[in-house]
Image: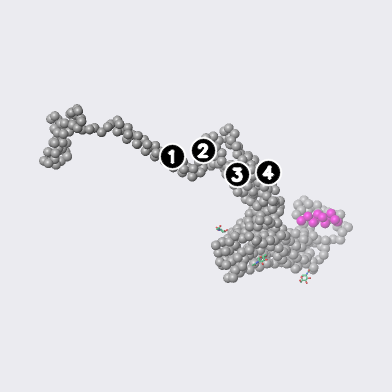
Amino acid sequence: MCWLVALLIYQPKCMPSMRRVILILLWTTDLVQPKLPPAAEVQLLPPVNFTLTVSALAQVLLHWKPNPKQQQRNYTIRYDVKILSPVPEEYDTGRTYSIQAVALHNGFSACLRTLLLHDGLQLSSEWVKEELPPLPGAPETSATNLSCVTHLSTSSTVSLHCSWLPGPGAPEDTKYFLFYRYEMFTEECQDYIQDKWDRSIECRIPVTHIDAEGLDQLIVIHINGSSNCAAIKPFQQLFNQNAIERVNVPRNVSVVLEQNDLLATWEKPISPFPKECFEYEFYLFNWKSGNKQISKISSNSFRSSIDVTSRYSLRVRANHHICRPRGVWSDWSEILSVGQTKLEDPTVWILTVLCVSMCCAFLLAAVICKMNHLWSKLFPPIPTPSNKFRDPFSNIYERAQTCTSETETELGSLAEDLCCSALHDSVF
Ligand SMILES: *[C@@H]1O[C@H](CO)[C@@H](O)[C@H](O)[C@H]1NC(C)=O
Ligand SMILES: *[C@@H]1O[C@H](CO)[C@@H](O)[C@H](O)[C@H]1NC(C)=O
Ligand SMILES: *[C@@H]1O[C@H](CO)[C@@H](O)[C@H](O)[C@H]1NC(C)=O
């Protein structure tokens, strides 16, 4: 009977109906068990020796002891842990320690109290508080805008690539160092890429201890630094392994034309995730109309009826959104092209235009030459002295000319000229 009671009280979040059951059982056991004092009479004391210890990078161990002055009875004692900073959180535990993975560069503070559940009542002690100071360093010298991606290689190892910006207050001689922690492995980056002042701003770790099949594990990044002019404040950030995993490119992408259809197929990227986890983005470009089309696909193929007179370019990329909602899209696959008109290369275009215009110029030149030749054949120059026929118009012309020369000297006006010639014309 007694063990049953204890078991039921131990359930911290019993439903109200369950509590009623407990009370009835307590009442029935009253006759055989020594009576527990009423809850109000129990004095609840806070835990002692509450300590915070940094047990690994961005990991703090909260540890305490039950208050030795607390009456040792059959009560169920639990502890209420309230984290105040950097990220507020409250939970209760029956143990006397708790481990938290959290960025510690801005310090850490937490409160703790004893809880007692008895007679359907919850009693609590005073709070005790502990804190860790912020990591030392001058303000604004920390690395900022940190971003990381992981990548699974063909040899089933996971690489890590991070980049960041030097803090606005970081002196020009700042050297940054990046460390990552995955479970109990902590390692420093060996391969940095520098900015123009030789401050490292990027790091690649080709082979890490990150488990490709780990689910929702944390990757802790710690960046500290050194400078002769200032103390560089460290910076920490925690990443969910699956949220930053960059998916590999889909493999063996191929495309064929089947009558009026374009059929593209590909294989799942290298990944521990099964085929069903993947979603693809398929990009299709029509060279003739200039239309771009991006389709989301969950299968490993794409079929579409196309304009057979046009050329198409396509590429595909992958994500495992279906199994891990926050992953990073893969790179695009190599561009593949199918269809007829081959216009994609601008140099081909320029050469074509040049060639056509040169041909046209030649043709034009040839035509002009030919035309001149023909013209001279059709209308040979008229040798005036050998003109056998008297042209009546030439007569008029001659007279008109004489008239003109006469009137010009007299009146000097074109209007008069015309008038004059008209007059002469009408006369003859
Ligand atoms: C708490 O810490 C003090 C000093 O470190 C120690 O003497 C004492 O025994 C500890 N109390 C408990 C209950 O462990
Ligand atoms: C860096 O991060 C800050 C705040 O998160 C943002 O305002 C800023 O635009 C970022 N800088 C760059 C260069 O991305
Ligand atoms: C940077 O952090 C690592 C890991 O905590 C530590 O071993 C190293 O001494 C630190 N370096 C500097 C310059 O603070």
Q: Are marks 4 and 1 in contact (CB under 8 Å)?
A: no
What's under tag 2, amino acid-wise?
Thr
Vertical comparison of 214 with 341: above or below: below
Which residue does the numbered mark 4 point to in the structure image? 275
Q: Which residue in the rendered view is the most extreme toward the left?
A: 410
Camera-side residue of 256 and 244: 256
Crowd band around label 2 with a 10 angstrom C-alpha radius: few (<14), some (14–19), many (20+) = few
Vertical comparison of 96 with 153: above or below: below
Marks 3 and 2, the one that precedes in the sequence? 3
Q: Nearer the viewer, mark 3 or mark 2?
A: 2
Which residue does the numbered mark 2 point to in the structure image? 341
Q: Which residues are magenta?
A: 2-12
Give the SS element for disc 1: helix
Marks 4 and 1, the one that precedes in the sequence? 4
Give the SS element for disc 4: helix
Q: Nearer the viewer, mark 4 or mark 1?
A: 1
Quarter of the image that includes the C terminus: top left
Marks 1 and 3, the one that precedes in the sequence? 3
User: Disc 2 and disc 1: Cα gap in Å?
Assistant: 17 Å
Q: Which quadrant would residue 81 be assigned to in this image?
A: bottom right
What secondary structure is the magenta-colored segment mainly?
helix
Q: Nearer the viewer, mark 2 or mark 4?
A: 2
User: Disc 3 and disc 4: Cα gap in Å?
Assistant: 15 Å
The residue positioned 62% from the left and 44% from the top of the image is 280
Marks 2 and 4, the one that precedes in the sequence? 4
Q: Which quadrant would residue 422 be assigned to in this image?
A: top left
